[in-house]
Image (spheres, helix red, strand yellow):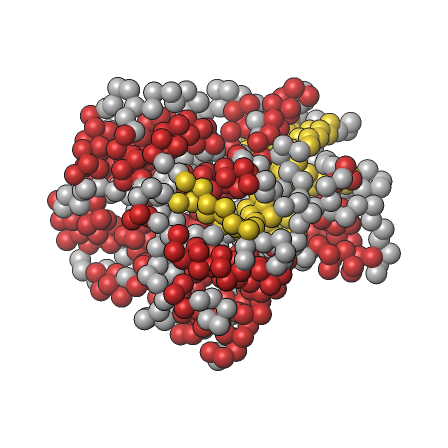
């Protein structure tokens, strides 16, 4: 797991200092090694920071080249099926000098060209220079687990794992004028929006082929999840989910460095811990977070799993003072603004203290198997969306922010449904907070609706909920939060529920079997009910909750604006959620985020 950066500039050839600044702005994500490549033919430079997990020797150093030095690669991620691909290549007479998956990527590309990306099961973002055909390839994994941002303008291309690196090219890089509107509507920045103008993420499952020297770019999609229902038998679905998830976890546990599991006490982390205990029984490390307030304690359920697996477990107490002390560093760690991510910050902080280099997370299970309350609200949404749109304006009079979200249902589509479940501020509120017109906010909202493919409206109702949760909440918030908070601490987080084989399987199971009206994550429970103790899967679902309601009341920046003061008052009275207050503060402080001592 690493951080990468690159420059092509035909107007002003990149100097060594600029690519080093881009690279080292991300050094927290690659503390073990670093590398640099300056091309002798094109005005091109690569930068690389390494977090070593496979082949810890110097043979895994990047940028990595093939024997002819015609292929140059910088790669962030893990290819979990690299051993199988390597065996296939060895049968074709390829010889390997390292035990790394990086070298497998190069040899796979030499054999199959861009078709090789269809073979990879993993999480990755990479840049590959092919000097045989004068082209550069940028590629990102099937689920968008690893980030890759780029800016292609005129005769210049910049790319990096983090948006912060672009500011090292030009400190005055212009800000996206509309990002605050998106952020206050969603609580995150939906792709392709970032805080910087002309800086966008590469789409997941996509490679961008860039010709040199013209910089003509062509996008190729190498992975798409299709709803192809081939499994209609419950018994078959249960068997397949059990077998495929087990195989996926086995792949994700392969590491030459210490690896552990985040154990919250919920179904997903408990299941992964139990299954891991069968794969690495002598080397099972788990960690969890506990609080002084018993209301947020999951210790009982964590202890159930610890006793069952004999895991080497550590619990870490997080207090209000810890939150206050770490808040400047939390904001520094954010590569892009997010209404959440603080919990990820602390669990990764303690994973590093534990001595781990990688950790397994249960992220993705709720989206794929129907674990959120949004799945239970689908029928209510369907009924409400039949009401004439103008009637939803009345929702704005409610003092409670949860009821205000009803107004989003004036959008008679999946976007209205998503924002009803997860939206933050209504367009009227955003306009008031940012001192702009509601029409400006509505324009932004309509632009995001255009990101939804037409087929989404034709999906089975619960399948549509899953699509929205996966492609908005998970893609734009959970995965981003997890990536930058983990890499800030030099920790790799692996997500076996987003294994390519498992995702393809779930999309082949008919929704009537995959979801249940009476049981959250029904199919997952049926597949593993003999592995996970009953008190775990029968309990009421809870998220990874912190006492933020109390903690955020103490966050009072100097010069608190009237809007912020009003939101803080709402937080104290219980009429708004803490995340709305926090999001507004971030929208106001982001430009000064490197000097947050005022908090």
The answer to which image quadrant residue 248 occupies is bottom right
Name the residue rendered at 43%, 32% in the picture: 330
The answer to which of 378 and 575 lies nearer the viewer is 575
Which quadrant of the rendered structure holds the C terminus?
top left
Name the residue rendered at 26%, 61% in the picture: 381
Which quadrant of the rendered structure holds the N terminus?
top right
Establish if 423 lies above or below 431: below
Name the residue rendered at 50%, 68% in the picture: 531
> How far from the left and from the top, in percent, is residue 446?
33, 46
> How far from the left and from the top, in percent, is residue 303?
44, 56
Name the residue rendered at 20%, 47% in the picture: 404
Establish if 480 lies above or below 468: above
The answer to which image quadrant residue 244 occupies is bottom right
Total labels: the figure holds 0
The answer to which of 538 and 316 lies nearer the viewer is 316
Q: Is residue 256 left or right of residue 522?
A: right
| Residue 440 appears in view | no
| Residue 530 appears in view | yes
Establish if 155 lies above or below 252: above
> How far from the left and from the top, in percent, is residue 182?
35, 39
> How far from the left and from the top, in percent, is residue 122?
61, 53
Q: Is residue 344 left or right of residue 132?
A: left
Q: Is residue 496 left or right of residue 402?
A: right
């Amino acid at each position: 797991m690493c951080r990468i950066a690159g420059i092509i500039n035909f107007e002003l050839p990149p100097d060594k200092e600029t690519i080093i600044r881009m690279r080292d702005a991300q050094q927290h994500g690659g503390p073990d090694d670093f590398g640099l490549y300056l091309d002798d033919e094109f005005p091109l430079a690569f930068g690389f920071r390494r977090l070593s997990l496979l082949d810890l020797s110097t043979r895994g150093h990047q940028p990595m080249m093939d024997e002819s030095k015609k292929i140059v690669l910088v790669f962030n991620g893990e290819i979990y099926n690299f051993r199988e691909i390597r065996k296939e290549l060895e049968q074709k007479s390829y010889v390997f000098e390292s035990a790394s998956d990086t070298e497998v990527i190069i040899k796979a590309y030499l054999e199959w060209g861009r078709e090789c990306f269809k073979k990879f099961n993993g999480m990755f973002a990479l840049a590959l220079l092919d000097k045989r055909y004068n082209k550069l390839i940028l590629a990102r994994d099937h689920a968008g687990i690893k980030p890759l941002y780029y800016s292609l303008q005129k005769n210049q291309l910049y790319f990096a794992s983090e948006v912060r690196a672009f500011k090292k090219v030009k400190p005055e890089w212009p800000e996206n004028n509309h990002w605050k509107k998106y952020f206050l509507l969603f609580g995150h920045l939906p792709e392709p929006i970032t805080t910087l103008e002309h800086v966008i993420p590469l789409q997941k499952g996509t490679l961008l082929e860039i010709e040199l020297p013209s910089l003509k770019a062509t996008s190729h999609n190498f992975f798409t999840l299709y709803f192809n229902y081939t499994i209609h038998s419950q018994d078959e679905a249960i068997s397949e989910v059990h077998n495929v998830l087990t195989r996926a976890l086995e792949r994700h546990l392969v590491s030459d460095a210490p690896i552990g599991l985040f154990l919250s006490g919920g179904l997903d982390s408990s299941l992964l811990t139990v299954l891991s205990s069968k794969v690495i029984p002598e080397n099972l490390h788990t960690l969890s977070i506990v609080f002084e307030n018993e209301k947020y304690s999951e210790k009982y359920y964590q202890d159930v799993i610890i006793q069952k697996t004999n895991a080497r477990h550590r619990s870490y107490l997080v207090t209000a003072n810890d939150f206050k002390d770490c808040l400047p560093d939390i904001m520094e760690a954010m590569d892009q603004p997010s209404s959440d991510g603080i919990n990820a910050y602390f669990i990764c902080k303690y994973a590093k203290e534990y001595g781990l280099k990688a950790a397994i997370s249960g992220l993705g299970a709720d989206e794929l198997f129907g674990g959120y309350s949004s799945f239970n609200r689908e029928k209510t949404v369907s009924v409400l969306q039949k009401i004439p749109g103008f009637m939803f304006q009345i929702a704005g009079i409610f003092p409670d922010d949860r009821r205000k979200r009803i107004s989003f249902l004036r959008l008679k589509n999946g976007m209205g449904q998503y924002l009803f479940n997860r939206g933050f501020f209504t367009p009227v509120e955003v306009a008031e907070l940012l001192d702009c017109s509601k029409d400006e906010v509505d324009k932004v909202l309509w632009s995001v609706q255009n990101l939804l493919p037409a087929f989404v409206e034709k999906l089975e109702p619960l399948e549509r909920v899953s699509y929205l949760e996966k492609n908005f909440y998970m893609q734009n918030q959970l995965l981003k939060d997890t990536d930058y908070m983990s890499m800030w601490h030099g920790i790799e987080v692996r997500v076996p529920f987003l294994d390519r084989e498992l995702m393809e399987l779930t999309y082949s199971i008919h929704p009537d079997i995959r979801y249940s009206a009476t049981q959250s994550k029904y199919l997952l429970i049926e597949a593993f009910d003999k592995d996970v103790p009953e008190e775990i899967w029968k309990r009421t679902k809870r998220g990874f909750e912190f006492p933020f309601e109390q903690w955020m009341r103490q966050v009072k920046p100097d010069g608190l604006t009237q809007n912020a003061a009003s939101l803080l008052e709402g937080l104290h009275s219980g009429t708004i959620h803490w995340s709305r207050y926090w999001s507004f503060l971030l929208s106001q402080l982001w430009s000064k985020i490197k000097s947050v001592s005022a908090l």
